[in-house]
Amino acid sequence: MAELLTERIVFPGGRTALCVRAPEETDAQSLIAALDLSEPRALLILNGGTAELDAHVAASLEELFSAAARTVIEQGFTVITGATDAGIFRLFGDALEKAGTLSAPCIGVTSAGQVKPSDLEPHHTHFVLVEVEEWSESVPLMYRLAAELSRRCPSLVLFASGGEITIDEMRQNVEQGREMIVIAGSGRSSDALTAALRGEPSAVEPFKSIAREARVTVFDLAEPPAALSNLIRSRLAKRV
């Protein structure tokens, strides 16, 4: 495979991030080498919605993510997100900035055909722009990267809100045997999976099938932020 193209993105204010442009068939080891990543202590994946959030939901997620970000920084956990400066990824990026200096990589993975540098969340350290046109087409490489990074360390995925692409991401985690935390009350796909897990009459496919196969902890939007940080720490730090 040809050498992957890398560039340094400079955001307003002088913050920079290493960006790799990767064909969709790129193998994970080549990508890790291009990103110059070392073996993680533990891996947290954040997936979910980039659509505009209800004001109450956004405010609650902001508090939860603030607690989660502090744990990420204190523990030195590597993070993978959907990269864009929108929805839950913007909230999490803002939380990282307020929490302090990153002690491990925060890697955003998204479709090169859908974004330009100004669309990327500026508090990440690394980006992978997959050379595809559709948002959903970047998911397989995101999860090949996640699988390789988590071969020798604990990993966990956190879902908040989300649409059709989130369904694909949930299935990837089922296939890789990764535990999920789903924030109930955050909307859309996260709430649909919660309904299926609880056996509610409103539950529908494919969430019912995912619920039968997945390892999921449901975390309610109204729970204390410290409870989320403790949950993440307990899952990721227990074998670190």
Image: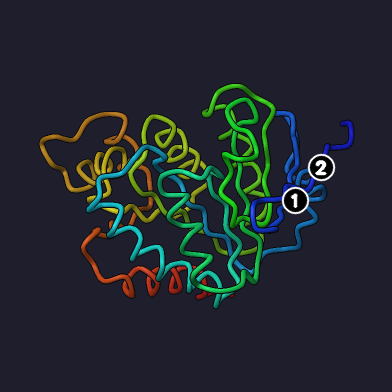
Q: Which mark is residue 18?
A: 1
**Quadrant (top left, top right, bottom left, bottom right) of the C terminus:** bottom right
Query: Is 75 or 235 nearer to us in this picture?
Result: 75
Q: Callout 2, which amino acid?
A: Thr
Whole-percent x, y for residue 185 in the image: 22, 50
Q: For the point 52% across and 65% down, which residue is it?
A: 96
SS under mark 2: strand
Q: Is residue 129 left or right of residue 210?
A: right
- Which residue appears at 59% of the width and 43% of the height? 120
Chain-order first, disc 2 or disc 1: 2
Q: Amino acid at mark 1?
A: Leu
Q: Position of residue 210 (x, y in %)?
A: 35, 38
Q: Which residue is mark 2?
A: 6
User: Is the C-beta separation of discs 2 and 1 under 8 Å?
Assistant: yes
When asked about the image quadrant of residue 1, the answer is top right
Q: Position of residue 102 (x, y in %)?
A: 62, 69
Q: CA distance from mark 2 to mark 1?
A: 7 Å
The disc at residue 168 is none
Residue sitting at the far right:
2
Does residue 33 show up? yes
- How many residues crowd around disc 2 within 10 Å: few (fewer than 14), some, or many (20 or more)? some
Determine whether 118 is above or below 221 in the image.
above
- Asked if residue 151 shows in the view, the reply is no
Q: Going 76% across and 50% down the picture, which residue do you hit?
A: 32
Position of residue 239 in the picture relative to residue 222 (left or right) = right
Query: Label 1's element?
Result: strand
Query: Which residue is depicted at the point 45% across and 43% down?
Result: 86
Q: Answer above or below: position of 2 versus 126.
A: above
Give the crowd class for mark 1: few <14, some 14-19, many >=20 residues within 10 Å.
some
In the image, residue 167 sits, relative to residue 46, either above or below, namely: above
